[in-house]
Amino acid sequence: MAVAGTELFFVLIQMDRKVYDTSTAMFFAFALGLLARGKFKEFYLLYPLGCVNRETIFLLSIFFAVHYFGKMKALHYLFGLVYQGAVFMGIRLMIMKIFEGNAGQLFYFQPWHVLKEHADHPIMLFLLMVLIALTWYGVSRQWKEKPEILQSAILVLLPLQVILYLMVGKAFEVRVFAEVYPVVWVMMTPTLPSPKYPAPCGYLGEGLNS
């Protein structure tokens, strides 16, 4: 199922794909894996590369702020927030300066157009809803047995991405959810119904719950 999920991801990103879609999923997978194992130094080294790749890396900072609130020493927590904020703003401003002469806008705010596109294509909307329902079924099964860090990741990242999709996205452009794909597939793969191979408790190891 993990292989099937990976292949499905590559199929989805073929839809109006961008060069940074696959690497975005990679950076989020690596970053969350490092955080889950408490390797904060490695995460801080990876973060600037994620900023260069795509500006949605700021979602990781929001996740960091929510998930680790009250779970680490205050100075370490504040350092993490300040470091990520400073690195993100510095790299973002640098990139904007380099490409300031290019045509286009900073972002396209078009929520009503996105909603209208959904309404104008009911069949595609129905298929999208079916895909979402099946995916959430796999994610939510045996929810209490899943590592807290993955629960936090899906609950923080997914709502924010839905908002961004509706506010500044393009209708049916599912590739823009690349940031949360690694979390979705890790959460749903071991818990799909299988009478022959039931999912064991703590399937990701105790380290991910610390």
Image: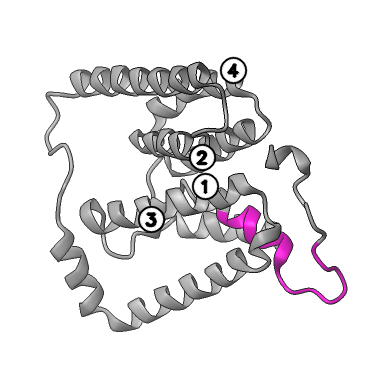
Which residue carries the number 1 mark? 153
Q: Mark 4 vs mark 2: which is more N-terminal?
A: 4
Q: Mark 1 vs mark 4: which is more N-terminal?
A: 4
Contact (Cβ within 8 Å) of mark 2 with mark 1? yes
Q: Mark 3 vs mark 2: which is more N-terminal?
A: 2
Task: Identify the residue at horizontal 41%, vertical 30% (top origin).
Answer: 53
Residue 136 in the image: above or below residue 153? below
Which residue carries the number 4 mark? 41
Between 189 and 26, which is closer to the camera in this rendering? Answer: 189
- Residue flagged by tag 1: what amino acid is it? Ala
Residue 130 in the image: above or below residue 173? below
Between 154 and 47, which is closer to the camera in this rendering? Answer: 154
The magenta stretch spans which residues? 184-199
39 to the left or right of 13: right
Which residue carries the number 3 mark? 159
Between 4 and 36, which is closer to the camera in this rendering? Answer: 36
Residue 185 drawn in magenta: yes
How far apart are the alpha carbons under marks 2 and 1? Answer: 8 Å
How far apart are the alpha carbons under marks 3 and 2? Answer: 15 Å
Q: Which mark is residue 67?
A: 2
